Image (tube, rainbow, N blue to C red):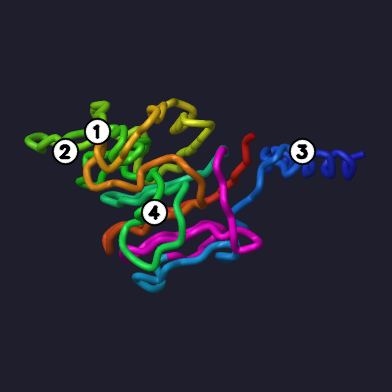
Amino acid sequence: MKSALCTLLALTSLIAATPLKAEDGWISMFNGKDLTGWKSNEEVPGVFTVENGELKVSGGRAHLFYMGTDGAAKFKNFEVKAKVKTTPGSNSGFYFHTEYQDKNWPDKGFECQVNSTHTDPKKTGSLYGVVNILALAPGQAEPQGGKHIKVDKAPSTDGEWFDYHITVKGNVITLQVNGQTTVEWTQPEGFDPAKELKNMPGRKLGEGTFAIQGHDPKSTTFYKDLFVKSLP
């Protein structure tokens, strides 16, 4: 009886630890062991490593693009769920509707900001440059471009894992941090980012893959439990 009970408890724990199942349409993007399915542009070599089942992003500017099992991952309507952790002064981001690029910040697609305490006032939960969750330091000038939602501090905390939930459906983008909606933005008909946004002509809905950003030599962030589900 005791043995059967232990087995039941072990199975229950396993089920609880894997709530996102393939039969529900969720696909795991990160195996926790290596970078299978991903490709770094190596603008700065060695930025992306796997340690203790976590993706560590540290050492400089580079971007890690999701290629998928066939090397041609592409998504239009989707949900993404991820766990992310910042460290003091760090900056990163999660791109969607983008494509592989050898260097520089990705020209195509949108960035979901990851930043708890970096000097950039655009904090976690921002649709970067489009709708900014803005926490200004005393005396800091308000940046140009996009809509600003002013807050006292970021919705994420250094050293603590937070849940990032990103949904794109039709012309609506929704970002949630720990279950709270930070941005819900509808791309207007006839939207022209070259005219509407500052130096971001590629910020327009279409289709593409995902990318994780390494920002600068002083930034260290962590990612795990990365899942995606395609939507009709």
Q: Are marks 2 and 1 in contact (CB under 8 Å)?
A: yes
Q: CA distance from mark 4 to mark 2?
A: 24 Å
Q: Residue at x 34, y 66 (%)?
A: 103
Crowding near the residue tagged with mark 3, few <14, some 14–19, many ≥20 C-alpha atoms within 10 Å: few
Q: Residue furthest right?
A: 1
Q: Are marks 3 and 4 in contact (CB under 8 Å)?
A: no
Q: CA distance from mark 1 to mark 3?
A: 42 Å
Which residue is tagged 4?
221
Against 3, is 139 above or below?
above
Against 99, is 59 above or below?
below
Q: Earlier in the sequence, mark 3 or mark 4?
A: 3
Which residue is tagged 2?
143
Q: Position of residue 212 (x, y in %)?
A: 43, 54
Q: CA distance from mark 3 to mark 4?
A: 31 Å
Q: Residue at x 22, y 42 (%)?
A: 198
Which residue is tagged 1?
134
Q: How many marks?
A: 4
Q: Position of residue 166 (x, y in %)?
A: 49, 37
Dot 4 falls on a residue whose secondary structure is strand
Against 179, is 23 above or below?
below
The magenta segment: 48-77
Direction from residue 6 to residue 153 in the image, left or right? left
Q: Earlier in the sequence, mark 1 or mark 4?
A: 1
Q: CA distance from mark 2 to mark 3?
A: 49 Å
Q: Amino acid at mark 3?
A: Thr
Q: Position of residue 116 (x, y in %)?
A: 31, 42
Q: Earlier in the sequence, mark 2 or mark 3?
A: 3
